[in-house]
């Protein structure tokens, strides 16, 4: 990225700024930054809520050793229209609360029972004013890589993600039971009657899905018609998903738990060994089925069947209850039946998001893949959405969901 672009879009990224981060991180005041380079590591369409940058810093220490360090910087959108949309959902405030308040306490709880695996990257710097941004460790330096979004997550990869989210869910449930105020920032409903900004995204997507389903052999006719009718009630049902019942088992949901926000470490053989979750910007304290339905419906690979979902839920429940028990959770432990019932009650979340996140996973040309392309009414936006929903592989996954009765439009 050329210096003029950096100065215009990200004026805070300077030699002095990076030098200060390095000195604090390494507790060495004699560090001097010699040069740095900024690149955008993700293609357009890989992230819809922020700009992601990788900064490589060349520096010398007090002993004149030459070293290199890399950081990931997540910056709130500079474009006013996108920033305004996201500000209405307090996404930056919520993510700050995760890294400043929740995650340190969660890691402390899990460490107390001998669980040392990490759930999230280290945040070196958080700036909540002017140009809002985080400076994170670069997980690629430890061997973590993004997952191929088009392929989705296979059964073994989903198990790793479910292990991490089960630990996070359990620890946040315990944390809330002893310190309710730690979840104060995460009571904001991601879909509510008060903020209609993203209504068109869900409504247009289910209509587009129904139009495609009307041409698929196993769904044309009655099922496609039910999908079309869902456009009238999809928002009201979404609002109910994000309505919390205080007497139920509630956890802090990641909120955007799909393949784009998973990084995996693998052995040379390809076997996955660990997962780390990123982008905790839309966390919501509510039913764990919000995360579970979101993950399974949007991100499971095609060879993961709806029948496999039952096995994965059993695995999640085992990890969840084991962690709650070890942490001496003082309330009723959720049974597997409780989780399954929650999936029926809140599973609409998976339906809502799968209609457009699955085609986004499959999209090769991401030229217009931004919030404007998803929400706008321009010719370019309409053409983008038409291309998005007509992808032939979209049929493979959605028809499988629908014909196996995983979707209920009534």
Image (cartoon, helix red, strand yellow):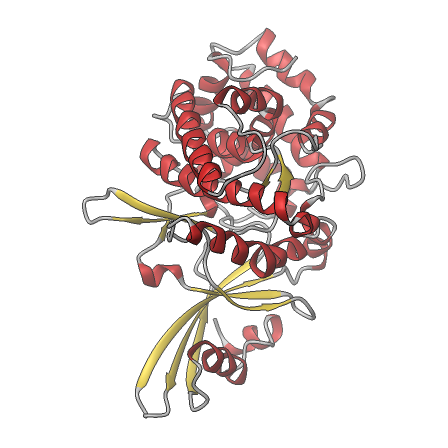
Q: Nearer the viewer, residue 271 or 380?
A: 271
Along the horizontal axis of the image, is 277 left or right of 385?
left
Q: Look at the image and tell me whether residue 312 can be seen.
A: yes
Query: Residue at horizontal 72%, vertical 35%?
Result: 199
Residue 408, image x and y in percent?
Answer: 59, 15
**Image-quadrant location for residue 80:** bottom right
Question: Which residue, as the protein is rendered here, is positioned at the far top?
Answer: 222
Q: Does residue 212 sit above or below 159 in this rendering?
A: above
Q: Nearer the viewer, residue 321 or 24?
A: 321
Query: Residue at horizontal 58%, vertical 54%?
Result: 102
Q: Nearer the viewer, residue 183 or 371?
A: 183
Q: The C terminus lies in which quarter of the figure? A: top right
Residue 4, image x and y in percent?
Answer: 55, 77
Query: Residue at horizontal 37%, vertical 35%?
Result: 159
Question: Which residue, as the protein is rendered here, is positioned at the far right?
Answer: 194
Count of residue discs:
0
Q: Look at the image and tell me whether residue 255 can be seen.
A: no
Q: Nearer the viewer, residue 293 or 250?
A: 250
Q: Does residue 46 sit above or below 7 in this rendering?
A: above
Residue 384, image x and y in percent?
Answer: 57, 39
Residue 18, image x and y in percent?
Answer: 50, 79
Q: Does residue 398 sit above or below 108 in this rendering?
A: above
């Amino acid at each position: 990225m050329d210096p003029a672009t950096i100065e215009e879009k990200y004026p805070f990224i300077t030699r002095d700024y990076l030098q200060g981060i390095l000195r604090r991180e390494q507790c060495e005041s004699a560090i001097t930054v010699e040069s740095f380079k900024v690149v955008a590591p993700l293609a357009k369409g890989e992230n819809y809520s922020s700009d992601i940058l990788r900064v490589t810093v060349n520096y010398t220490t007090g002993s004149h050793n030459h070293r290199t360090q890399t950081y990931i910087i997540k910056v709130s959108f500079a474009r006013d229209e996108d920033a305004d949309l996201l500000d209405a959902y307090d996404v930056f405030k919520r993510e700050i609360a995760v890294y400043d308040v929740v995650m340190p306490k969660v890691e402390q709880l899990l460490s107390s029972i001998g669980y040392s695996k990490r759930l999230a990257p280290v945040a070196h710097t958080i700036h909540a004013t002017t140009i809002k941004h985080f400076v994170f460790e670069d997980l690629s330096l430890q061997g973590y890589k993004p997952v191929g979004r088009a392929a989705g997550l296979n059964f073994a990869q989903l198990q790793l993600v479910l292990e991490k989210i089960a630990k996070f869910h359990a620890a946040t449930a315990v944390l809330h039971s002893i310190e309710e105020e730690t979840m104060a920032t995460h009571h904001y409903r991601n879909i509510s009657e008060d903020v209609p900004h993203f209504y068109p995204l869900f409504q247009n997507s289910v209509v587009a899905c129904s139009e495609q389903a009307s041409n698929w052999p196993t769904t044309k006719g009655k099922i496609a018609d039910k999908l079309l009718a869902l456009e009238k009630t999809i928002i009201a049902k979404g609002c109910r998903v994000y309505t919390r019942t205080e007497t139920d088992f509630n956890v802090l949901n990641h909120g955007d738990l799909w393949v784009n926000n998973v990084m995996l470490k693998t052995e040379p053989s390809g076997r996955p060994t660990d997962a780390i979750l990123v982008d905790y910007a839309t966390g919501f304290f509510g039913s764990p089925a919000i995360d579970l339905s979101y993950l399974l419906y949007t991100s499971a690979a095609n060879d993961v069947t709806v029948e496999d979902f039952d096995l994965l839920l059993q695995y999640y429940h085992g990890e969840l209850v084991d962690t709650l028990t070890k942490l001496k959770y003082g309330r009723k432990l959720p049974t597997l039946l409780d989780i399954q019932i929650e999936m029926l009650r809140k599973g609409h979340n998976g339906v809502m998001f799968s209609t457009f996140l699955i085609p986004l996973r499959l999209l090769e040309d991401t030229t217009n893949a931004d919030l404007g392309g998803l929400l706008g009414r321009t010719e370019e936006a309409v053409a983008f959405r038409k291309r998005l929903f007509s992808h032939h592989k979209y049929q493979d996954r959605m028809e499988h969901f629908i014909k196996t009765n995983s979707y209920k439009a009534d």
